[in-house]
Image (cartoon, helix red, strand yellow):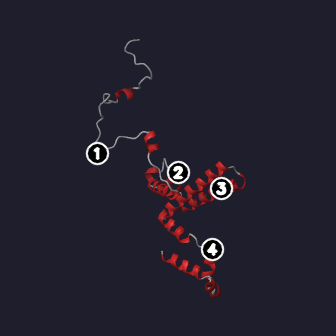
Amino acid sequence: MPGKPKGKKQTDLESSIKRPARGTKSAREPGSKRPQTKKQRRSEPTPTTGAEILDRFWSLIETRRSVDFLPTSHSARLIARGTQRVAKKLGEEVVELIIEAIGGDRPAKISEAADVFYHLMVLLVDAGIEPKELWRELRRREGVSDVVSEALSNSEPEFRDEFPDAQVALVNLGRE
């Protein structure tokens, strides 16, 4: 039939949208960016370290905790239910990881571990603890043996005399 478009039929809404002619630019606000396609979003550089990924996750959860996101965000709904519910959910995820660690396959362990990290980030957002505070504490603990740390904190003079380098290392870590 002449004049009938081939292919997909347009709805009334689609036909009412005016599109620029081919080869011309659409009218946008000055300085605004063209919306990205899914393919373009996927090709953006992604964080390269685990800490960068968790920092980004924390920021996203922090942004979505507002009431505006309650209908669409699991994080917002969980935080709105209170700290006790957030902590309980993290505990549930840890138990699921333990179960998979004992008898699950590798993909299940990875999936459950990711759930634990996500819910830990929700707990940190709820508590107002930024990832940089966590990274600082982990750096402080890096390379410190629990046995050495405990022995030095108990102020055992004979141990401190026997291992002076351990004492110096702990003192230096405490200054950071």
**Are the residues at dot 4 and dot 2 in contact (C-beta closer than 8 Å)?**
no
Nearer to the camera, 49 or 112: 49
Front in this rendered view, residue 48 or 1: 48
Which secondary structure lies at badge 1? loop
Q: Which residue is mark 3?
A: 97
Residue at 39 percent across and 16 percent down: it is 4
* Residue wearing tag 1: 31
Q: Residues within 10 Å of mark 4 (few under 14, many from 20)?
A: few
Whether residue 105 can be seen here: yes
Q: Which one is in front, 15 or 162?
A: 162
Residue that badge 4 annotates:
146
Residue furthest out toward the bottom = 157
Residue 77, above or below 36: below
Residue at the extreme left of the image, as rendered: 30
**27 up-or-down from 54: above or below:** above
- Which residue is rendered at x = 47% and y = 43% of the image? 42
Q: Amino acid at mark 1?
A: Gly
Q: Between label 2 and label 3, give the one nearer the viewer.
A: 3
Residue hosting label 2: 74
Q: Closer to the observer: label 1 or label 4? A: 4
Q: Do tag 1 and tag 4 residues touch (Cβ < 8 Å)?
A: no
User: What's the distance in space between the residues labelled 1 and 4, CA to CA?
Assistant: 55 Å
Q: Nearer the viewer, mark 1 or mark 2?
A: 1
Residue density around tag 2, few if under 14, some if 14–19, many if 20 or more, within 10 Å: some
Dot in front, 3 or 4: 4
Q: Which three-letter amino acid code belongs to the residue tagged 4?
A: Asp
